[in-house]
Image: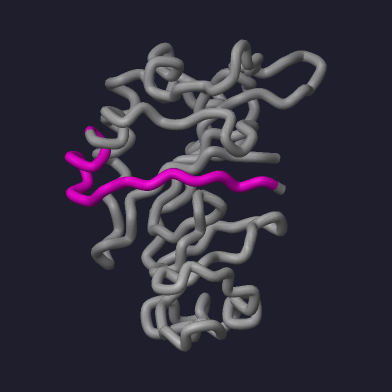
Amino acid sequence: MSSLVLSPKPEIATTPNLENILIYLQQHQFVGIPLQNHLQQTLTSHNFLVGEAFLHLITFMGCSPYIELEPQLDGKSFCYIHIDGPWTELQLRYSDKTQSPRCHICHKRITTWKETLELWLAQPINNIIECPHCSNKQSLLDLSWRKDAGCGYLFINVENIFPGEAVPVPKFLTKLATITNTTWQYFYIQS
């Protein structure tokens, strides 16, 4: 499964207010009805069908992408919204296909990032990684993930979207920033 992920940047160590974000997403029709109501099954309360304004808030790339927006009887994948969090501890979202991040000073790839990962996940704010090329010490937050991974306390996953297939409209991210008092980022997860 592949996802477009929207997340408030972890500029301040505070958990975003999920209720305010959900109210905005519902009022502006980014999310539709909860998925379990549509399927008559119990999944989680954080899965939603896309809302009526979804295609105005997300831009799809390419000449004519075909995205299924509702569940299919044949069980094929479809695009829906999953809200992951909020978390009290900083989270890193990446996949087995995530490329090595780049040092924010010398811009060379840090191929040893996975060796540091377990230690970093135990204490994300305090741990640093040293660039093997320029010896700059930085946290995983400082690394350039190039839209291939990201850190945060809350994630809005647009499920079944391939990397680069869609991007959020800038005014959508700006409005989310106003609600949460922090800028928002987007990246892709591909598994």
With respect to residue 187, does 43 lie above or below? above
Q: In the rendered image of this protein, does residue 1 appear above or below residue 183?
A: above
Give the residue at x 49% y 85%. Answer: 130
Query: Which residue is at the front of the view, 66 or 103?
Result: 103
Pick the quarter of the image with the N terminus: top right
Residue 43 in the image: state x and y as whole percent.
Answer: 61, 36
Residue 92 relative to residue 77: left or right:
left
Query: Residue 36 sits in which quadrant?
Result: top right
Q: Where residue 35 sits in the image (x, y, percent)?
A: 55, 26
Whether residue 70 is visible, yes or no, is: no
Q: Which residues are magenta?
A: 175-190
Spot occupied by residue 168 in the image (x, y as percentages of width and height): 41, 31
Q: Is residue 138 magenta?
A: no
Q: Residue furthest right?
A: 74
The question of residue 177 being in magenta is answered with yes
Q: Is residue 94 visible?
A: yes
* Residue at image coords 65%, 14%: 66
Relative to 115, is 15 on the left or the right? left
Residue at 72%, 15% (x, y): give it. 72
Q: In terms of depth relative to the viewer, which is nearer, 65 or 71?
A: 65
Measuring from the top left, give residue 64's x and y in whole percent: 62, 11
User: Residue 11, located in which quarter of the rendered image?
Assistant: bottom left
